[in-house]
Amino acid sequence: MLDESAELSVSITQIVQRLKGTHLHSQLEKQAKECLHKPEIKLETLKDDVRRLLKASGMTCLPPPRHPRAPPEHTKEPLAYMRKAQVNWEKRILKSLNSMCTELGIPLARKRPVPEQNELTNKWNEMGTDEPDLSKFRPVYAPKDFLEVLVGLKNPNNERSEDLTVRSHWGLIQVSLNVRDIPQTREMYPELGLTYGQLGIDDHTHVPPDLFESEHIHIGKKVVSEHDSAAAQQYSRQGCPTGLRAQLWSLILNTTDDPEAITHYEQLKARVIHHDLLVDNLIYKDVKLTASNDDYYFVFEDYLYQVLLCFSRDTAVLEHFNYNCATPPKSCIQSKSGSEQCAVVYPPNGVIPFHGFSMYVAPLCFLYNEPSKLYSVFREMYIRYFFRLHSLTNPLCVLSLCLQFERLLQTHLPQLFYHLREIGAQPLRIAFKWIVRAFSGYLSTDQLLLLWDRILGYDSLEIVAVLAAAVFAFRAENLMEVTSLASAEAVLADLSTLKVMPLLQIFLFATSV
Amino acid sequence: MSKNKQTAGHKGAYSSQRKKEGEGRSCIRYRCGLTNTIQDVLNQRPGWVEVKDDGEWDFNWCDVGWLRENFDHSYMEEHVRISHFRNHYELTRKNLMVKNLKRYRKTLEREAGRLEAARCDFFPCTFVLPSEYHIFVEEFKRSPGSTWIMKPVARSQGKGIFLFRKLKDIIDWRKDGSRSEEQKDEAQVESYVAQRYIENPYLIAGRKFDLRVYVLVTSYIPLKAWLYRDGFARFSNTRFSLSSIDDQYVHLTNVAVQKTAPDYDPEKGCKWQMQQLRQYLTAKHGFETVQTLFKEIDNIFIRSLISVQKTIINDKHCFELYGYDILLDQDLKPWLIEVNASPSLTASSQEDYELKYRLLEDTLHIVDMEGRLTGKEKRVGGFDLMWNDGPVYTDVGLEALGSSCLVENTLLGCVNDRQKQLQQLLKPFPGQKRT
């Protein structure tokens, strides 16, 4: 009992702290002051009266925090060997970054001369037309490098025999984390069940719209007009209609159009103009290699630069390290006098982009085209979800997603898993790239957005692991006939025709357990 | 009496092939003047055999040159089909299209009033040169500072097109000695059109694009037209800006022109499928706005076809697959840029190949040499019947909604689940088992 209320007061203090200085806070203050002038207020019942009048004036109580900060003991990884692995990994990528910097003789950061600043300002909306020489730059790491780290993770207390038995784990991940199986996942995702309507299934061409779709859209419009964030999240579990998705996601993520957000973005833009960072080149290279080569995202090249360059300079992102067991990379800079060195976080947001990073932003360009709006939504999605896909963190990160994927496959498609293992095609080697990107760039855009609807609706990335297993289940017949890793990859190379929701529904609710 | 069997290459007289009404043919002899996707489609169609040179044919996918030279001298049996109307240029040559549209508009205004005539205002203000030069100059002077575009009437792929803002520019052009001799000679005979340039195109991520949509006409009197669900948006490779009207790469979105632009990367591709575009616009503007937009686009097809209905020589042997180029402006108003009688069937990528393959396959299904259709279908594969001597409405609308709400039978940019539909609709080819 005591713990709970202590926890609650910590959360409340945190919220109050966050609110201070925001527009909402000043609005509340102003409104409260106005209430004081009303005749109904009595000194004895001041608190209650003010609260009542605030409610009556339309300022409702804040909904309970949807995304509470993790309790203090979870912010750092309790398992020592995981912490060690994360630290080693961070050292490796920082070393890679620094050595690239030394090799190329390019400073990590430099102030732009004024003519260059002006040029960049003029070209801000068309940075994609630039063709800088990026041949010397390599991505700092690719997802498969990170996979090797995950595969190498071992609990030193656990003796693993090499025998392959029914009880042993056949996959690559060697740590035992608690992950959900199908019955537990069903409990977590009831709205994906067969008795619920879904966008992605029940809006199909030969389903009459009044069975589900029309009503669902009608409800969606109401949710949007009432600005109800909690309702939007619940609603999103059954999919967001294309015409309402942008507003619904904004509501769920609590990103607003208020002047604060726009000012913040403009400040970041100014930082980009003033200083050039080495990581900018990594961003350019990544966009050119991935998003620009994509049949659908190539159009949004300019937006991607506008978002990602600002993102690197956003120190507000550092806050997420409070619940991410990673630590932001630091680099030494020389002070002006040249005598001292001090460690600063580099890049300023603490996130070193890797190969494919820009694909987190690309699908969002379909929904938002004002840069500050696009930026806010992306940043929020990053600090809630995407960071988990490339770091070792509690409670949910890419490691547990990989393990969940492997366990689901082993439990429900043991023949397939065994076969693939025997031919040297460990399923995770194929599925990992899908998981790291939350399927961005692999599914067609409309299907991807339906998947991300559920990530937001259930506030969890688990669905990504489940989908990966469902894809294998779908192509199981063909996969049973392949005889090499290369041919297995070929079977799973093109996911652009997949319909995500039927696959998930069948896997979760129509598979005998 | 032997009916359908005909061994390949056997040149028989037509009479031995005549069938009873309703029975399909099993061997169809075709001629094909092109060497791209259509060649594959015809080649792979069960029971179709190519004939060359002077062989007799049942089906001819010809180019317009062949048509011009041979159509008038060919006798065609009743069942024979050819892929163009004799005087299609009434719709596809820019000067003639403008003339026909303007005349139709006038008639509409006289008969049905201003409001109805205003529904024809989907083509930018256009004048044929040199014949309308003087009224063009009047209009030009009335709107100083606006940009105009000059297009040769009968060229394609963006050739010969340029933008101008000052009369001086075109006076110079007419006298320009730097143009090749060949061009000068052509200019004597060939007309140009000067058209108001749409200065506020709808941009996606700063880029201009236009739409390519496919419309199949199987008869002009009565008018029967089908609309294909697939199509694509072609993007300009560079960012749109009015300051560089000399940069034709910015303004012209033909793939052919983009291919020669210095920063063109063939790996990149600069097309979006129509479904992608429709989803993007719906996400931006909402479902109802986009519905209205696509209805207005339908309006362009129908009215442009009606305007030439009486001019085109109707011939039951003829059908034509048109490629319409549509441009959207920032207010989401669609504009007709031009109509192509020979839309490019060469594929720019694997995806593009598949789209054109499907399109041509479904075209052949509708032409129905095999006699498998009843003639009452409202949908064949990816084609939806858009106009059948009057508007066409879906059947679904009436049942599900119960009220008298009629829903137009067009689904541009919507899901194209043609395989399934074709399986249910068509009997297998003779000799082919249903899979």
Image: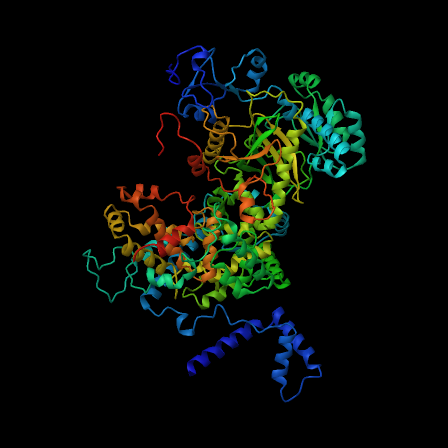
Indicate whether A411 appears above or below A55.
above
Q: What residue is shown at x 53% (from left), y 14% (from top)?
A: B76
Residue at (37%, 52%) from the top-left corner?
A506
Q: Residue A181: horizontal and vertical position, in percent?
A: 32, 61
Q: Residue pushed farthest bottom? A: A44
x, y (%) of residue A454? 45, 57
Res A348 visible: no
Q: In which quadrant of the rendered view does residue B253 lie?
A: top right
Q: Which residue is rendered at x = 47% and y = 45% of the image?
A: A206
Q: Quadrant of residue A270?
A: bottom right
Query: Where's the C terminus of chain B, which quadrant?
Result: top left
Q: Nearer the viewer, residue B71 or A96?
A: B71
- Foreground of the two, A396 or A123: A396
Relative horizontal placement of residue B220, taking residue A68 as reference (left or right):
right
Give the position of the N terminus of chain B as an image quadrant: top left
In the figure, is residue A283 to the left or right of A506? right
> Quick check: can you spot residue B163?
yes
Q: Would you place residue B47 above or below residue A171 in this image?
A: above
Residue A498 x/y as whole percent: 41, 46
Residue at the location (40% across, 27% down)? B429
Its colouring scheme is rainbow
Looking at the rendered structure, the number of numbered marks drawn on it comes to: 0
- Percent across and percent down for residue A438 are 43, 53
Compared across the picture, whether A281 is left or right of A261 comes to left
